[in-house]
Amino acid sequence: MSIENDLELTKLYDSKYVLNVFNPTPIAFTRGKGVWLYGTDGRKYMDMIGGIAVNSLGHGDKELTTAIANQAKKLIHCCNYYMIPQRSELAFKLCNKSFADKVFFCNSGAEANEAAIKIARGYFYYKGHPEKNEIITAKMSFHGRTMATIAATGQEKFRTPFEPVVPGFKYVEYNSIEAIENAVDEKTCAVMLELIQGESGVHPADIEYIRKLKELCLNRGILLIFDEVQTGIGRTGRLFCYEHYKVVPDIMTLAKGLAGGVPIGAMLCTDEVASGMRPGDHGSTFGGNPLACTAGNVVMDKLNSPDSGIIANVNAVSSYLFEQLNALKSKYPQITDVRGKGLLIGIEFDGSIQAAGMKTLLMQNGFLVSAIGTSTIRIAPPLIITQREAAMFVTALNKILKKRK
């Protein structure tokens, strides 16, 4: 029995049998095409959140779905005791297009960040400095929901219910090089940052801050970790967000958009940092499986193909959106800020509009976004969204604000 098209039964089963950690909106979707999702209610919705920056190629991309289906017919999973050609190919593509020399594959951004934390500590352990095991992260950061990554996350609300948390983390103000300078000591092994803090309201790092941070890490002999789980894979208009800053990390984490919707995570590092893990030190049963890596290879091929024009499209549509959203900001005082990079954009409102309320109003008008905190909505649509589709979102937002003026 399938309940795919029965929303009421889905709601019943969900409330009765699914652990309620998401508090889902009572709508469900039967299929998707491009930037559109089609609901069991017969309506279509523009997916302006893209599965939280996951559906990089949109829904139903022919090359991606064909490759996944063909691979599933041949081999879905193979134990990591053996060579996996799809994994090797994806590792090559990621290293070839980035600073990295080595890749570890897993299943999510949190797992990728776990690997980054472990290898940073392991690097100094194998160099004979086990005391260098503390990692500096930023206040209001978000690095995942495992025990180590909630400890790395600079938001107390994610840690308090699950204390005691993993020790070895310090939290400093974001975009303050002085705060990091004051926090570094003989125990520091790494600084771990998002180049855009997505879960606190889409706050980009200042260019000068990141460049001074790199200099500090080099001078103090500590590792620099960029969490690009949300910003990587074309999201900000470059393949990786660090390219905007012209600063190269020692370690980088990826996930979300890497396989276009198939669960995958990746921790990338230099050969030097790779000495922080030896055979048996880490692993993942499902990480690097043929199915996920096949999907990742398609995404990498399409993003890096001159013929696809996807990265160019991100930049073009992003420029249009920022222009139009800032025009709305000038028109409506309820919008207090528009920020982000590429197709990761936060729109902040004053106290007269709650983020959750705006999210609901947009959904009622056929547009899906996420609400962050009380005042900000986030958009992170598929990278293939057209200017015409983006204009539809702007028009809907204008219509809502005009009614509330």
Image (spheres, rainbow, N blue to C red):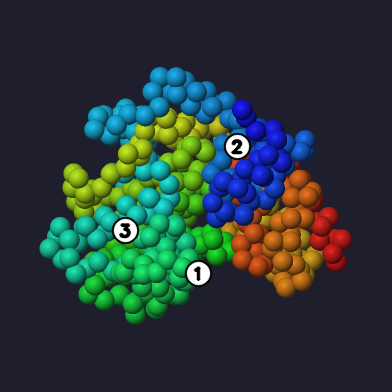
| Mark 3 residue crowding within 10 angstroms, few (<14) / some (14–19) / many (20+) | many
Left or right? Give the position of 51 relative to 362.
Answer: left
Mark nearer the N terminus (2 vs 3): 2
Q: CA distance from mark 1 to mark 2?
A: 32 Å
The residue nearer to you, when weighing 331 against 358, is 358
Q: Which mark is residue 117?
A: 3
Q: Secondary structure at mark 1?
A: helix
Q: Residue at x 50, y 23 (%)?
A: 69
Q: Does residue 57 sit above or below 395 in this rendering?
A: above
| Residue 62 visible at all | yes
Outermost residue, front side: 16
Question: Quarter of the image containing the N terminus?
Answer: top right
The residue nearer to you, when weighing 187 against 244, is 187
**For mark 1, what is the residue?**
157
**For mark 2, what is the residue?**
58
Q: Residue at x 69, y 61 (%)?
A: 356
- Looking at the picture, which amino acid does disc 1 mark? Lys
Q: Position of residue 351 (x, y in %)?
A: 73, 73
| Residue 155 visible at all | no
